[in-house]
Image (cartoon, rainbow, N blue to C red):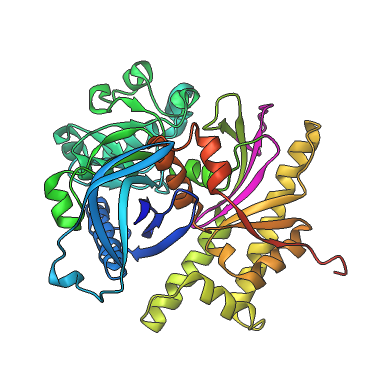
Amino acid sequence: MLKTVLCADIGTTSLKAGLFTADGEAVFLCRKSFSNPDDRYIANDWLLALQHCIKKMHSQYDFYDGDIAISGRESLSAERKIKSSSTYSSPAEKKAVLVCGICISGAGPTVVLENGLTFRWNENLSAVAQMPSEVARSLFLPRILELKNRFFDDYTASSLILSAPEFLIYKLTDVSLTILPEARFEAAYWNKKTCGQVAVDFEKLPAFIGVGAKSGVLTPSVAATLNLPAGIPVFTGAPDFVVALIGTNTLQAGRLCDRAGSSEGFNFCTDTPFFTPATRTLPSVIPCLWNVSVLSTESGRIFVEYKHALEKKLGKTLEYAALVEEIVKNPDSEGFRILQSILAQVKKSVEVLKSALREENIPIPASMTVTGGQAKNDLWMQKKADALGMTLEICNCADSELTGDACAAWFGLGLYKSLQDAAEKIVKVTKRFTPNENL
């Protein structure tokens, strides 16, 4: 019996899902693109996207039910196979799998109302400059206020204000909550005082809960929809940038990672916080540590826009890894020129971070972990390593948000004593790209 956790991460344009064992093996990975990611009610598609991924899982695995007690040791009793509909019928040689828990993460700070009305993390804000400084520093309150101003009737009618992972957790468990990665993050979220300063209804915001906490269990009705056992515990992931740091084990001072997706961020873990105009400093999910980052928002956006335009022209969805491989092989193509532009922006962003570290007399790491679609193409990783003059490391799963969810779930199940302990056991470097010294 293969014991796994089911992890799902809600992105800007797609939902990713996977099954992970306790030692970090991704035994199944799936992505479901949203047909219209700009839909104002896109949140209502997230459960359908998860259902799509689980349906694909059923094509390879037989799902079993059982009483699960996991705390250092695992035990299983009363296991039984879940009855599958004809939609999921498959060969007898399918492997047996037990889903011990579910963990959800997602794009933060996307804000969602109870009816699914969605205000995305990358939408423009109109009035941040006029807000009190405490409010403007929040990642969420300016977006909640913008949503309230634009969609007042929906805001008034909604009893809840949630972010992306919390909305899907609410749909799975009928439990409302807010994931606070660590106590110091409150300033980046809200409190009763800051809500009062801009007339945001504090009572609409669910109470804070930590990462890897059991939020509830899969309700019978949703379990039937997903063709999963009812009662599976559902655990809290975090905003995607937080679980990405867990999933690359950027949880010790001196470690650096490149989270390369729709936006690209270079994140350095430090025990000595510092603040500069060119960097963003937030608490780590680990107490006493901090994350200093430089965002390269254009590098990811440019490539995503190129990919979407090409997909529209060809009339089909393109995988990131295959597209990058094709581009790199054609130096005269428009795509290659875009990648060269991205490399220039990446070099600039990394140099900004390095310069900030030098100013603080903090040693610059010789290597950087890369995650996201870019990490799935070896040729591109070598070019990036050459351009940066740094060793690039790739982990056992390039989708580090899912790996971070796996760490949170297995920690929540009691198999590991802390998130750091889970990351040390689950996250493994599988490839290294060393810069070519002859260039």
Q: Is residue 270 magenta?
A: yes
Q: Quadrant of the N terminus?
A: bottom left
Q: Residue at x 43, y 46 (%)?
A: 405
Is any part of residue 433 visible from this angle?
A: yes
Residue under the point 53% across and 66% down: 303
Given residues 378 and 149, the one toward you in this image is 378
Whether 9 is among the magenta residues is no
Specify start and end residues of the magenta stretch as a single range.
253-280
Is residue 5 rendered to the left or right of residue 434? left
* Residue at point 37%, 60% (across, down): 14
Quarter location, residue 325: bottom right
Q: Is residue 112 above or below residue 179?
A: below
Q: Nearer the viewer, residue 178 or 21?
A: 21
Q: Is residue 420 left or right of residue 229?
A: right
Q: Residue furthest right?
A: 438
Relative to 360, does residue 219 appear above or below in the rendering? below
Looking at the picture, how far across and down is residue 36, in whole percent?
A: 29, 63
Residue at image position (23%, 27%) is: 204
Q: Nearer the viewer, residue 117 or 60?
A: 60
How many marks the image carries: the answer is: 0
User: In the figure, 118 relative to 389: above or below?
Assistant: above
Looking at the rendered image, the quarter that the C terminus falls into is bottom right
Give how far across and how far down residue 390 sits, in percent: 76, 55
